[in-house]
Image (cartoon, rainbow, N blue to C red):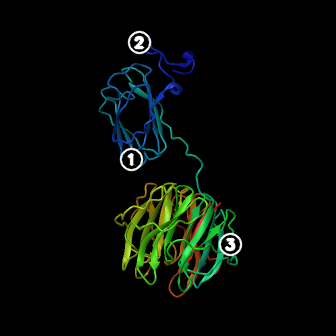
Amino acid sequence: MSGQVGNNILRTSGVVAATAAGLNWVSTVVTASTLTAEAGNGYFINTTSNTCTITLPSSAEAGDQIVFMDYLRTWGTNKIIIDSNGLNYQGDPDSYTVEYDTDGETVNIVYSGATKGWIPLNDDVVADVPIKGNEEGIFGYGGSYVSLTNLVSSSGVVATDTTGVGTARSSLAACGYGGDKGIFGFGYTGSDVSMTNLVSNSGVVGTDVTGVGTARLAPAACSYGGDKGIFGFGYINGGPGYTAVTNLVSNAGVVATDTTGVGTARDSLTACEYGEDKGIFGFGIDGSAASMTNLVSNAGVVATDTTGVGTARYFPAACSYGGGDKGIFGFGYTGSNVSMTNLVSNTGVVATDTTGVGTARRTLAATEYGVDKGIFGFGQTGAPRVSMTNLVSNTGVVATDTTGVGTGRSGLGACSFN
């Protein structure tokens, strides 16, 4: 027990109960679907994979206390259910349904006696840590083989063209690394390339870095682990064609050699971060349009195919929003250009189609900006290449077209920096 005895609750038995500061916090995080709780304990409840039914003690004394904490802010997805095990809860009998289903909630209950039973001392939502994410973004490269870039401010304003650094190319990808920097990689100059160009935390693009990994076009890339990145999939001219090979990017921007691909080989897909430290590849073409996805763990391990949700298409774009917690796939080509979007939850679940807002187009790019928002930009509506953009709010709502700034182009990449 800790704290002054005078601040503690005296049980009817004469035993002094521990204060909240003196609780025995159980170090093992609860991930199971059931828990039998004991008085005097605090529990971290992780409901990422399932709801959790918590059975309270069958007998209790006034002053007994138990605390439950939402370990990963997932109670909004999978709630906790409290079984008061024959005792009252806030004056209601055991038959009363007790559930808590709000992300970030902490439930602190104290037993008051037989009449009212267990009473929440508090059941507040704990404020999340400051939102993770980068303030600014950058669009770069694209057809017809240019290397110019356009910075995106923290308020989503796209700047005029910056003279390109590095080899002009299209059909490349980009992602963040190091928590505050970015990297453009791979692409097509008339032949496949594997070169990369680092982006500093002030948005300055570096000269070409000799490529590591198989040269290819139309891959995708996203960040993972909070400070690393991954390039994946694409098309290799001259054989074997579609590939699922991946290349990890360290937190210093160093690209690793090929990792044998997992999942259906394809190109013209896209990727984004979700859950603050994980990633997801989605859609693409493997001879026909696909809607499958492949999750990326916070260690950079790519999972096997997940059956697609949403309209199969290729040439879409994707970015995170909500501080890297959630993601959005948008636009693309099904045989005709589309503007539909699909949200990605903080557990990597892809939602069904949302009716598109903005001009339908393909071969565009997207990036995070403003810490918790996103932006789709550029692309192709047919023969014309466009420079219009569409902002994404921190709740995943896509805005109507913003008149483009910068040279219209397609097949470009985009990433955020800070």
Q: Is residue 319 above or below residue 126?
A: below
Q: Between 361 and 41, which is closer to the camera in this rendering? A: 41
The structure residue drawn at horizontal position 54% and vertical position 60%, both measured from the top left corner, is: 321
Residue 82 is situated, as x and y percent measured from the top left of the image, at 36, 35
The residue that mark 1 highlights is 78
Q: Is residue 266 above or below residue 124?
A: below
Q: What is the number of the mark on residue 180?
A: none
* Amino acid type at mark 2: Ser
Residue 136 is situated, as x and y percent measured from the top left of the image, at 64, 63
Quadrant in the picture for residue 89: top left
- In the displayed structure, does residue 379 sit left or right of residue 102? right
Q: Between 342 and 151, which is closer to the camera in this rendering? A: 151
Q: Which element carries disc 2, helix, strand or loop?
A: loop
Q: Using the numbered discs, state the Cα–Cα distance from disc 1 to disc 2 in whole angstroms.
A: 38 Å
The residue that mark 2 highlights is 13
* Amino acid type at mark 1: Asn
Q: Using the numbered discs, state the Cα–Cα distance from disc 3 to disc 1 in whole angstroms.
A: 42 Å
- In the displayed structure, does residue 292 sit left or right of residue 383? left
